[in-house]
Structures are given as C-alpha cells and as structure tokens.
Image (spheres, coloured by chain):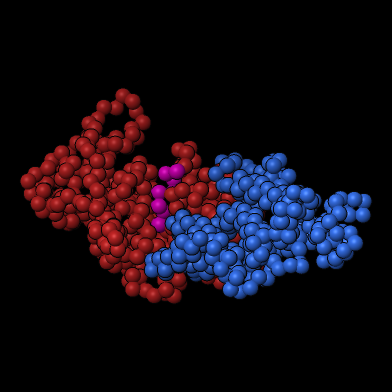
Chain colours: A red, B blue
Amino acid sequence: MPVSDEILLEVNDLVKHFPIRGGVFSRTVGNIRAVDGISFFVRKGETLGLVGESGCGKTTAGKVVLRLEEPTSGEVIFEGKNIVELGREGMRNLRREMQIIFQDPYSSLNPRMTVGNIIGEALEIHGLARGKAKEKRVKELLETVGLTAHHMRRYPHEFSGGQRQRIGVARALAVDPKLIICDEPVSALDVSIQAQVINLMEDLQNEFNLTYLFIAHDLSVVKHISDRVAVMYLGKIVELAEKAELYRNPIHPYTQALLSAIPVPNPTYERERILLKGDVPSPANPPPGCRFHTRCPYVMDICKEEDPEYKDWGDEHFASCHLEKGAPKKEVIATEE
Amino acid sequence: MNEEQIGTGTRRDIESPWALAWRRFRKNRLALFGGILLSLFILVAIFAPYLAPYEPNRTNVLVRQQGPSEDYLLGTDDLGRCILSRTMFGARISLSVGVVAVSISMFIGLLAGSISGYSGGIIDTIIMRIADVFLSFPFLILAITASAVLGPSIFNIMIIIGVLSWPGPARILRAEFLKLKNVDFVQAASALGAKHLRIIMLHMLPNAIPPLLVSATLGVASAILLEAGLSFLGLGVPPPDPSWGNMLNRARQLHFLSNMPWMWVPPGIAIFLAVLSINFLGDGLRDALDPRQE
C-alpha cells in the first residue's frame, strides 16, 4: 500500500488523567493516569498498531485522539492543526476526517435504529446526502463492506457479530474519513471471523487510501495488519518501531515478553518463554522510575529511581530502557511461518 | 462473503424491536388479560353516555336506597341515583385522572431526568436534590394539604398527583441516561459529530423509554388509587360528579356499609379490577421490553 512521507496525525506528550473523587465534597483525592505522556505520529496511508495489556490506556488514548475524551494536556495535530484547541464547530467539521470502529459489535449499534439509518446518520449530520441519494449511498456502503443492499431495512439484533462489525465499518466509512481509529475491532469476534474482518479492513485501506490507528492487545493480529507498531505499558509508550524491526529486534524487555507470548502454530518448535511476574501496577499509583521495573527480569538500581528517556535507537526505532544495548537477544518468536 | 445469509428482506420478515416486544407480550396470558380488561374499562369510559341507563347525577327520591332490581341493575344510592351509571361515569373520571396525572409526572420527569442524566455535574446535583426534597415529604399529607389549599376539583387533583410524583420517572430516566452515555453507539454518534439534541432524541431516549413505559403504566394504577383515596377523604373530585373514590366516600356511613352493600361494592370492585389489570399489563410490558431476554 502506498505509504507517503506526509504525516497525517501527530500526538505530542498526550496526557489523560481521570480524577478519583472521594470524601464528603467529592474532592479529587488522586488521579488515574490512564495516558501519561505519549507521543507518536502516523503517516498518511499507513497502519500504526498500538498494543498493550488490558488497562494500559490504549483505548483511552484512541478516544482522546478523537476528543471523545478531553485530554488533560498535550497536543493532537491532525493535518497540521492542533485539534485540542478547536471549538465545537471546528471539531464537528473535523469529525468527517477521523472515525472510530469499536470493539464490541453488540453495544456499538443502536438497537432501535435500522441499519440504513445507522449508516445514513453520518450523511444526515453532515448534510452529505438526503432522500434517494442517501439511500443509494447506504446501499453502496453496505456492498463495500460485504453486506447486501436489502440489509438496510433490518435491525442490528438480526445480525451476527461479524456482520455487525461490518455495519460498524460501513458507518465509519460513510463520511469518507482519512483516519480510522480501530479500537480492538476483532477482539470480540470468533477467530474464523477475525480474519475476514481484518482482510476487509485491508482491502478498504487500499481502496480508499485510509490511515489506521489499530489498537489491539494481540501482537499476532497487529503483526498482520500494521506497518509500524507501538507498545504501551501503564500509560506510556515503551517502544515503537517498524513492524519487522520490532519483531526481529525488540529493545524493551516488555516487548520481548509480549512477543514470546504469541502462539506458534508448530507444536514441536522449542523456544524460550519469558514469563512476567505479578500484575500490572495500578495506574492510580504507578511505580517511580521506569514503570516496568517491578516486573522486569533485567531490573537495575537506576530503573527504580530514574524514568528512562524515550529515544531513537536508530532507524526510527524508539524505546525507553536503561539497558545499554536493550534486552538481551533471545529466540522468542517464530521468525516467519 | 457473508458469514451467513439472513432472510431476503421483504417487509414482512423484518422484525423491529417493538414488534419483537409485542410477540413476547402476546405470549404472556396474564398481561394479555390485563390489557383486555383495561381496554374494556376504557371503552366503557369513552362510551359511558351511550351505555349508562340513567343520567349519573339525576336524583330521584322515589327510588332512593333501592337494592339491585330490573330497573336499576346495581341499585340506587341514598339520593336515588343509579349506581351502575355512576360507576360507568366514574370510570371516565378515575381513568382520566390516572392518565393525565401520569402524563404530567412523565413530562416533568422526562425533562428533569434527561437533563440531569445527560449533563451531569452541578446541574445533575441540583435537580436530584430537588427530587429528594419532593420525595422526603409524606406524599399523602402533602397531597391533602395541597388539595385543601387549592380546593378540590378534578383538575387540581390531576395537577397535584402529577407534580408530586415526578421524581420517580426522573430518577429512572437519569439512571438510564447515565448508563447509555458511555455505551459505544452513543460515543459513535458523537464521533460522527451529532449534536446533543440529536444524541438525546435519537439515541438515548428511544433506548430509555421501555423502563419508563413500565413505570408509567404502574403510575396510572397508583394515581387511580390516590384519586380514590383523596376523594374518599372528601378532598378529591367534588360531588355530585361521580368518581369511584367519592362514591365510596358517599357510602362511608355505618348504615350504608352494613345495610346497602350495592352502594360501595361496585366502585370498590371497579377500582380493584382497574388497578389489577394495569399492574398485570405493566408487569407484562416489563418482561416483554426487557432486552436481556431473548
């Protein structure tokens, strides 16, 4: 697919804290640091995978980029404009450029609207098409995502999970967006359906020159669709690199551990598994220094005090780790099937 | 390409969520019975002028205090008025008090609940504290005081019951809105750039209506009981217009109670059956509209 050099989306030091309220007068007694200063950029036409465990803040990051949640601080620059500063009208116009596909196909469609109205809503909101023209466009979109025109008069409860997800994709496509944030779009689907939806999304990307920010907790899904991959841990990006580079040469021990957890479709293949101890610490009270030091197999004294710098290790391979040469190389993944 | 094919999409086999609810409702015998009984009450109320054998307010001292007979199927009261006619016309007043009062409380509750639930924050707190104030007064005593101050009339009764019972529906709607605000399809609508009004009217309200509908149905039943209670105390519908409540009030004397059961049994049974049928209907609606059942 044609990835240009042009940067479509740039996120600088984005922070989202959710206040924890308590006490008699709902005073703020602390913060959940869901997203704690992340920076990345996405080039036009590429797919940036964003992976991490549950609760690491990846979904919040996606929502803040769309301003479905207001950021606490930081910049989101879309086509050169800082959208954090946009007013309500400006933001409404920008909604045509960036869209979202949700994880759960059951809660993402209004059960009391027909599929035609769900997909056509965007056209109505932005005054893109009405009446017959709207109907025609909805039919077109349904066919684009692999459904048929007569589905438009049906209600969501009559469809299967995979079909519902296709409807969600059609809704996002209705406004002809440039960027689509895919919030774990296949995690809730059966494995057999996952591949179909992923392939559909790839086809659509080529056809409409879409840019994806693809959020997932599964490195094998991300590996298939992404050009570059960012790994999040506890509200921060710990590593970001071109896909092959990241899978071949993980610098951060956390990335290495994630990679070692990818299932290998070969029962005789022997490899070293890296098993992390303990749980992810609470984002309300992240550990000082490097956030990963409580679980890192290579922890040093400096890790407990100083937050490692997030820097370029060469060839746009970004990572934040105190280890001089990164995590020791290990045969953790099956290179290519 | 599709995982599975579903019907060909002729209009007949498309099932809207309301059609689905109706299909489930039909299976519920008790609810269906409630619905039919209530429909009968409503029909009688509407066509009372044609169905009733006598003018409900016409007195006739010659036939006063008569038991059921061929001329007066349910007998007459102490002023010689036909009990059957009065019970039929009473249905008009009792049912309309129920419906209008609930409409008022639903309207206020809808407005307050949706604003409260959607906006959250300080507005939510203010509205909910006002609701708490309304709930903290003993309902009957407040209603009695209000009706004593405003004077008893059908219209006042509707307003008093309606205005005093808005916190119920408001709380239900607020809870639904709080839940819906974070549901993905609402987020999707705002990601598409939908305005607040559109989100509320198209995405949140239609999905919040079912529990409200159930509470409205049950509200009609309790409004009818309240009207009866207030009228019984002489603070509701003023005589001579008949309501089930003031017919009971009329029969309050020991002499009538012990010797003339036809004076108080018909309105009593009417109240009982109306409330029962509405409650059956409400329960049936609750089961039919519950999205968790499939």
Q: Nearer the viewer, residue A180 or A224?
A: A180
The vertical placement of A323 against B125, above or below, is above
Q: Nearer the viewer, residue B84 or A133?
A: B84
Q: In the shown orientation, is residue B94 left or right of residue A94?
A: right
Residue for point 21% across, 36% down: A277
Q: Which residues are magenta?
A: A181-188
Q: Residue B84, located in which quarter of the rendered image?
A: bottom right
Q: In the shown orientation, is residue A158 left or right of residue A18?
A: right
Residue for point 40% across, 52% down: A183
Q: Nearer the viewer, residue A20 or A128?
A: A20
Q: Is residue B211 visible?
A: yes
Q: Is residue B147 magenta?
A: no
x then y, percent, for residue B160: 60, 68
**Looking at the magenta stretch, what is its main secondary structure?**
loop
Residue for point 34% across, 56% down: A60
| Quarter occupied by the C terminus of chain B | top right
Q: Nearer the viewer, residue B223 or A79?
A: B223
x then y, percent, for residue A145: 54, 52
| Quarter occupied by the N terminus of chain B | top right
The vertical placement of B33 against A205, above or below, is above
Q: Of all residues shown, which one is farthest toward the front?
A: B255
